Image (spheres, rainbow, N blue to C red):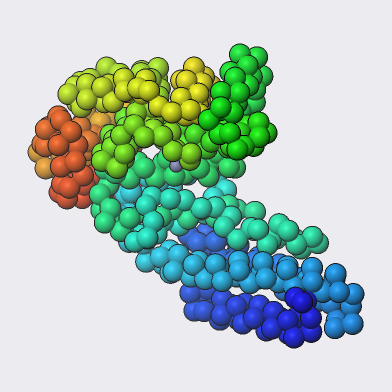
Amino acid sequence: MDGNPSDLTLLLASAQQEIDGLRDDPRMSSLEAGSRGVALRSHVLDLIGAVEYRVAQSPTPSSPEPERRAFARSMRQSILVLRGAHAALPWLEATRRPTLNLGSLYLTEDCARSLVGNDVDLVVVPDPEFMYSTTSWMFSAVVISTPGFVAATTRRPIVLNYPLSDSDRLLLHPIFAHELGHAAVDEHRLVADVEAALDNDPSFVAAFGKAVTDMEALWTAASPTQIAGTVRASLRQWIEELLCDHLAVEALGPAFLWAFSSFVMPLSYGVPAQSHPPNTLRTRLLITHLTERGWRAYLDRAAPNIMSWLDGIAADAASPIAMPYSFLRDQLLAYGQVLRDTALSRAGAHAMSPAEAEVGANEAADLLAETILPNGTHGPLDGRSILLGGWQHAFVEHGDHPGGIVAATRDRQIQELVGKAIEMSVVEQTWTEEA
Ligand SMILES: [Zn+2]
């Protein structure tokens, strides 16, 4: 029986071993105040603190059996999360020696502040195992389920993973803005906002009911409640993914559309999944959003052929797909305005506007055409405009077609110049603000 005296001895020793392993690791040594990784480190210390708080309430061998068994379960959960926390050690190491291009890192931190808020600690690390992905509050399961323990960290730690092969492919890095969208959605409970708007509309409620009835004929082994639960879970995941796309558009404009299509279209075309909407639908909603925000003329001017290719993908969003995905697709197309409004109101004053960005992007593209660092001839250009200008110039260099969009992300020279220019412009702007 778990929770017997030998079991308790094992668990306490094992928990202590995990705690010592974390605490004694040189990568856990303290960081300078204000530097990257401080909140992540403090989150790990909160985890250790919460487990020690639990250990202090350890039952004695003569305590009642239910109490000992409950404690054993709580220790096993703690040990699992403590073992997972060892993953934070290379992340903390990465904050001391960032491998990501500095210009890209500045731009990503700027996105984090606009989309998530000021109180974030961003750690960007390459990971051979992961695609682009993100986690926040990664060890909170134990911290929040330890009644009486008060965590020291309130600053949200965010870890962004990216494929190591993409560390200097700056033109793809707008995907980070989508990843940060996940943290923004979580912090500001944006999925619940969108869901509430849908659920308050009787026509959505009726369509949802009908979808569940239709599904009963297909999923004969499942009850209506189970079907409704499954459809609801997918709905939430699709809303979250689409919101992240829309937030990325508010943060970085067309650069996100181009990075997104270059990265995801080679992986999947119109196949829906439980967790992700088909890329045809994502493309359609992205283009609608960019058009509504005034970017269409710019897109048609910068890369007209790419645009007509993407329009074709968007049109395929209407292709037949299986239930319940067709239901989700139809509803999210119908309620696209809710997604757009939610993203715009989150980005607020940080939303990128075509009128301002286009001038800077043109200037950056002109400078790149002369192989000149595109950080501006009359004062520093905005980093987001430089990135956009980088794409603009890449289409000139590599062609306005799907092959060109791939070749663009392989062009080291453009991406090095863009990264350096963003870095310089941030440094110059900081100087001007401090002067
Ligand atoms: Zn995502």
Query: Visible in this render: residue 50?
Result: yes
Residue at 43% x, 47% y is 109
x and y percent of residue 63 in the render? 89, 78
Q: Note whether 38 is above or below 393 in the view shown.
A: below
**Foreground pick, 266 / 249:** 266
> Residue drawn at (49%, 34%), measured in percent from left and top?
238
Apparent side of residue 325 relative to residue 230 in the rendered image (left or right) = left
Q: What residue is drawn where x is 61% and y is 13%?
A: 203
Quarter of the view holding residue 219: top right
Q: Is residue 228 above or below residue 175?
A: above
Residue 115 percent coordinates (x, y):
50, 38
Count every numbered label the image shows and give the total: 0
Q: Is residue 250 visible?
A: no
Q: Is residue 228 left or right of residue 123?
A: right
Q: Nearer the viewer, residue 432 or 289?
A: 289
Q: Regarding ligand 1, which quadrant of the image does it lie in?
A: top left
Position of residue 371 in the picture relative to residue 248 (left or right): left
Residue 259, image x, y percentages: 29, 38
Where the N terminus falls, by quadrant? bottom right
Horizontally, residue 22 falls left or right of residue 415, namely: right
Q: Is residue 338 above or below residue 164?
A: above
Residue 201, given in percent of the width and then of the height, sits at 63, 16
**Which residue appears at 51% of the width and 53% of the height?**
135
429 up-or-down from 258: above or below: below
